[in-house]
Image (cartoon, coloured by chain):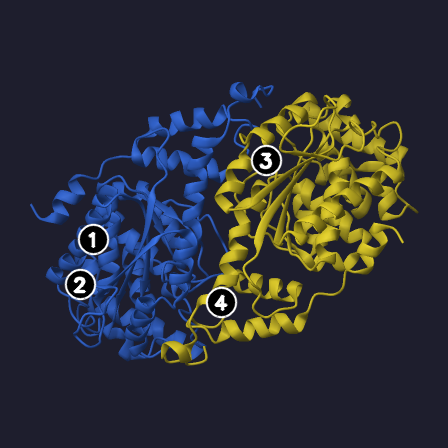
Chain colours: A blue, B yellow
């Protein structure tokens, strides 16, 4: 069996009984029942994922994967393709938004070159997992071969295994890749059948003419690479990107290790959707950090069955939403560990 | 002049030019313009408040004030009045939700007895500022005298001056007091004229019969203490509570020192509204942390002109929402300080 097959086979249902046990613990704490709302849900979800009613406070990592897209040559972005490489260097030097927010969250940042167009030499501080320097233009054929998609997925799985072995218990995901909202839109259209006019967004900030071109480009991609009859892996290969496939691998690997994954915006969440299309039980392991301005994000999250914790009008990617939301997981678990019960604190409990 | 008068006189408009300068700095950072959404607004607001385009990272404190309410004897809460005192002890021992979340946020927690019914001796870890052991039942007359309201306000102002003098640059507020959603509802009704059927909520979790009683109790309070013709201070005295008046003082004091104040839920935000009714420019200094389940909160925030950062279905009070949101202020300022510009990082800027 391949690494992907063994990983998918290891993904089991989350543990509803552990979630119920966590809720019972929360109900005994000195506060009105359920008065911490979504924070209580979050504690229970992590209990279900880790199969433990009081999960330990996890060590945190954010995996940011970068890749270039052949479709960028169709002029679908407000930025030129070389920005992917430039931003990879910015990540390596610590100057991007995700560097700042990962530091604030106390999360280790793992930057991965999954397939950027740029010089071949290694960048200090960047994991080199380049499948190829950019996908092919999917308006002319598949973005990548199934073998390349599998390789990217398995790089992601291997990275999360290393993180888990080093003690990481909470993973956030993020991405960088000029043109990748176009790829994510094509994937979402393929998986959902939703109208491109509804799910195509403005990416980094395109004007109306570029938006209309983006819709036409995705339409062409879907006619050149018709989804019907294809497996999730084949769709991911035809319409995805190396960073999207890599992140889908991270999500699958994390689920196989019973580690919660904090999604980011539209593209990272679409990687989560790809993972759930490959192994449906994965959906129980993901936490939606925020709702992006990017219009398709809402639909991706509804397919994954998750409500975002934050709605801050953000549309940057890189894992920035994940970094902002990861401390909430920590807070929710601390409530389970550190709050006194009614009995311990001698506070009158009316059961309300 | 009284301390309240000098404080109100020191509250000036926030500095729009500093906010614009902060936005220009943000626009030069390596990200599409405005792609960090509300985080950018937050950085600009703190710039405006502190009159500095790149405000330093602030030291943080959360002030939680507790008080008892004569109206609690009308049976308007799901919990008996002694819970206020019991929870004050729980705060002092570190076992309440706010203790946990303040630790997670890295904020100093300042717990204040503003007027709890309980033994007279000091509790280690609690600032004793008890005006009286509980307000009077405002269905039979004013909750407190104007002199007592002024004393409570000035305790709050003095506490924030001490915090500011010790280097605190960001203040969160929270409260505890059985019966205090009833007081906050009465204050909101007095200031807004809104229908009690629309703004009266479920507090700690009351049933339909108790809710109907709560509406009737507030109606009676408003007829016994008719708001028309009264000053904001007189309304606060008639319908408020010692912890609400104290927190209004904290908000006024912070604004006079150009320190941003992170509000919490319905009651703490109503204290903010009282402060803004006393000195309208105060509204520019408050940040709404979250939207509470408590139905009147929405209206309070709209009067203050602020949108909450979080909406997590919470209704606990104590400053828990403030504690969850305070790290966002820190993140927003770190973006200003630590992110590289397009020039510094050699990233192509298309101005989008």
Q: Secondary structure at mark 1?
A: helix
Where is B57 relative to B109, above or below? below
The residue carrying pointer 4 sits among few (fewer than 14), some (14 to 19) or many (20 or more) residues within 10 Å by Cα, namely some
Where is A148 relative to B153, above or below? below
Q: Secondary structure at mark 4?
A: helix
- Side (left or right) of A343 relative to B236: left
Pinpoint the chain carrying mark 3.
B
Q: Position of residue B257 (x, y in %)?
A: 71, 58
* Tag of residue A198: none
- Side (left or right) of B282 relative to A248: right
* Tag of residue A159: 1
For image coordinates 32% across by 76% down, the residue present is: A83
Does the CB distance between marks 1 and 2 fall below 8 Å?
Answer: yes
The residue carrying pointer 1 sits among few (fewer than 14), some (14 to 19) or many (20 or more) residues within 10 Å by Cα, namely many
**Quarter location, residue A220:** bottom left
Callout in the foreground (1, 4) = 4
CA separation in Å, label 1 and label 3: 40 Å
Q: Which residue has dot 4 on it?
A: B337
Q: Which residue has dot 2 on it?
A: A129
The residue carrying pointer 2 sits among few (fewer than 14), some (14 to 19) or many (20 or more) residues within 10 Å by Cα, namely many
Q: Which residue has dot 3 on it?
A: B316
Q: Position of residue A349 (x, y in %)?
A: 58, 20
Pinpoint the chain carrying mark 4.
B
Q: Are marks 4 and 2 on the same chain?
A: no
Callout in the foreground (4, 3) = 4
């Amino acid at each position: 069996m391949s690494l992907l097959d063994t990983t998918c086979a290891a993904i089991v249902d989350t543990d509803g009984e552990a979630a119920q046990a966590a809720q019972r613990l929360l109900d005994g704490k000195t506060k009105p029942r359920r008065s911490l709302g979504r924070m209580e849900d979050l504690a229970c979800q992590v209990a279900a994922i880790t199969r433990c009613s009081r999960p330990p406070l996890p060590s945190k990592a954010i995996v940011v994967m970068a890749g270039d897209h052949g479709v960028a040559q169709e002029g679908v972005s407000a930025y030129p393709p070389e920005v992917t490489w430039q931003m990879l260097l910015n990540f390596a030097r610590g100057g991007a938004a995700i560097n700042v927010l990962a530091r604030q969250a106390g999360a280790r940042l793992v930057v991965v070159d999954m397939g950027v167009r740029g010089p071949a030499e290694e960048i200090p501080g960047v994991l080199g997992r380049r499948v190829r320097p950019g996908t092919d233009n999917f308006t002319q054929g598949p973005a990548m071969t199934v073998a390349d998609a599998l390789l990217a997925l398995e790089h992601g799985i291997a990275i999360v295994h290393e993180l888990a072995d080093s003690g990481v218990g909470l993973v956030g995901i993020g991405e960088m890749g000029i043109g990748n909202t176009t790829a994510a839109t094509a994937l979402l259209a393929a998986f959902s059948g939703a109208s491109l006019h509804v799910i195509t967004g403005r990416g980094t900030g395109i004007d109306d003419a570029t938006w209309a071109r983006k819709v036409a480009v995705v339409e062409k991609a879907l006619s050149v690479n018709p989804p019907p009859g294809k497996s999730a892996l084949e769709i991911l290969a035809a319409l995805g990107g190396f960073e999207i496939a890599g992140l889908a691998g991270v999500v699958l690997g994390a689920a196989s290790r019973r580690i919660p994954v904090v999604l980011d915006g539209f593209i990272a969440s679409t990687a989560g959707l790809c993972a759930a299309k490959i192994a449906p039980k994965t959906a129980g392991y993901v936490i939606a950090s925020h709702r992006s301005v990017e219009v398709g994000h809402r639909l991706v999250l509804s397919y994954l069955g998750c409500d975002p914790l934050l709605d801050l009008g953000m549309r940057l990617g890189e894992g920035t939403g994940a970094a902002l939301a990861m401390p909430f997981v920590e807070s929710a678990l601390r409530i389970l560990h550190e709050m006194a019960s009614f009995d311990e604190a001698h506070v009158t409990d009316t059961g309300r």
